[in-house]
Image: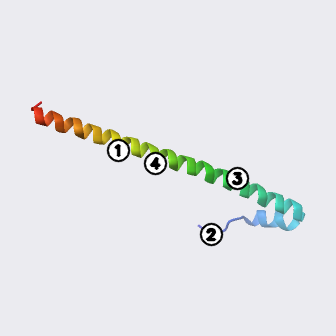
Amino acid sequence: MSGNIITGEQIKMAEEAEPSQVLLAIHKRIVSTEKLMGEYRTFAQNQQLEMEMLKERLIEVKRVVDEMKKVGA
């Protein structure tokens, strides 16, 4: 991985572009990044909620297994 954020072609385009075009491109990149981060946050929250629900179900399953062991089933 070269570590470059933009390609040589993109640099050339930026050098030839009007300042307003460069600012618009930066703005679009920021907006898309913010949208992506929002989606990631939602995904992470959903994953956390699902894990909590699975923990609760596991606790219930363990309780049922323990009860079955007590009655000798």
**Which is closer to the viewer, label 4 or label 3?**
4
Q: Which mark is residue 48?
A: 4
How many neighbours does mark 1 have within 10 angstroms: few (below 14), some (14-19), or many (20 or more)?
few
The reply to whether residue 17 is visible in this rendering is: no
Q: Is residue 26 above or below residue 65?
A: below
Residue 47 lies, in percent from the top left, at 47, 46
The residue labelled by disc 1 is 55
Badge 4 amino acid? Gln
The reply to whether residue 32 is visible in this rendering is: yes
**Which is closer to the viewer, label 3 or label 2?**
3
Between the C-alphas of marks 2 and 1, the distance is 40 Å
Which quarter of the picture shows residue 66? top left
Q: Is residue 67 left or right of residue 47?
A: left
Q: Quadrant of the N terminus?
A: bottom right
Between the C-alphas of marks 4 and 1, the distance is 11 Å
Question: Which circle's residue, 2 or 4, is located before the other in the chain?
Answer: 2
Look at the numbered disc 4 and give the secondary structure of its residue.
helix
Determine the residue positioned at 64% across, 51% down. 36
Between the C-alphas of marks 4 and 3, the distance is 24 Å
The residue labelled by disc 3 is 32
Residue 49 lies, in percent from the top left, at 46, 44
Question: Which circle's residue, 4 or 3, is located before the other in the chain?
Answer: 3
How many neighbours does mark 4 have within 10 angstroms: few (below 14), some (14-19), or many (20 or more)?
few
Badge 3 amino acid? Ser
Question: Which circle's residue, 4 or 1, is located before the other in the chain?
Answer: 4
Between the C-alphas of marks 3 and 1, the distance is 35 Å
Q: Which mark is residue 3?
A: 2
Between the C-alphas of marks 2 and 4, the distance is 32 Å
Q: Is residue 13 left or right of residue 50?
A: right
